[in-house]
Image: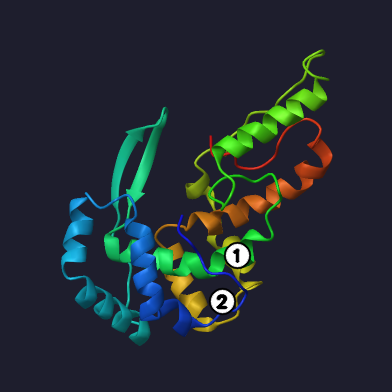
Amino acid sequence: MGGGVNGHDIFDFEQIISLNNLFNAWREFKRNKGKRQDIKLFGFNLEDNLFALYEELKNGTYQPSNYASFYIQDPKLRNIHKAVVKDRIVHQAIFRLIYHIFDQHFIFDSYSCRFNKGTHKGVDRLEKFIRQTSQNYSRPAYILKCDVKKFFDSIDQKILFELIKKEIKNERTLNLIQKIMGTIYLITLSNLYLLMLEIRPYYKLQSMLAVGSLGL
């Protein structure tokens, strides 16, 4: 997911679009993707491309490109929307400056797309709850396995944007985030939407299951 930036001074639009942040976002985004042709092409004229992107963001002329849509079997059929490299850099530039302020609102047992979390830690935590509930596998334990059908397609953008506005007040930053929301969502922002569902079950059902996105 990238390194991110610590602290809570994240509402400055100029900090988000700064060349330093764009270069760091590029480095984080291209990590382990260096063989992809589109990344090679962008990197061939890296400075020109990033300076041009900076000018678009600064002048307010930046517009996300259309996304390539395709399907993968993982193991069920999933519809994937792939952004162009330039847009992915913008996503990462925003993400690395807003992640920490939103992450503090997530419950402990939310494991998807978070630093120092992930699938393996989620499974370990689930196993701990199963051992506790079953008294070390000496009695039955019940687990609720569920998924949100077509989650991204079902997100109410107005509700999500209101959640974001509670933390971010800078108008230019909000406008940029809204442009991205009009096409595809940053996973961190989408997790905010799930947060409304996570809090109540966590306290009522914590003896039964590890609540949150395990990323399984």
Left or right of 68, for residue 108: right
The residue at 77%/20% (across/down) is 141
Q: Which mark is residue 205?
A: none
Picture residue at 33% right of the left edge, 67% below the top: 64
Q: Which residue is mark 1?
A: 100
Residue bearing mark 2: 10
Q: Most extreme residue toward the top, as rendered? A: 138
Say few, some or many: other residues with alpha carbon within 10 Å of mark 1 (under 14 / 14 to 19 / 20 or more): some
**Relative vertical location of residue 145 with respect to residue 97 in this rendering, above or below:** above
Q: Amino acid at mark 1?
A: His
- Asked if 18 appears above or below 122 in the picture, the reply is below
Does label 2 or label 1 sit earlier along the sequence? 2
The Cα–Cα distance between marks 2 and 1, rounded to whole angstroms, is 9 Å
Give the answer, above or below, for where 54 lies relative to 110.
below
Q: Secondary structure at mark 2?
A: loop
Residue 39 in the image: x percent, y percent? Answer: 23, 57
Residue 122 can be seen, yes or no: yes
User: What residue do we see at 41% from left, 64% from top?
Assistant: 91
Percent x, y of residue 195:
67, 52
| Labels 2 and 1 touching (C-beta < 8 A) | yes
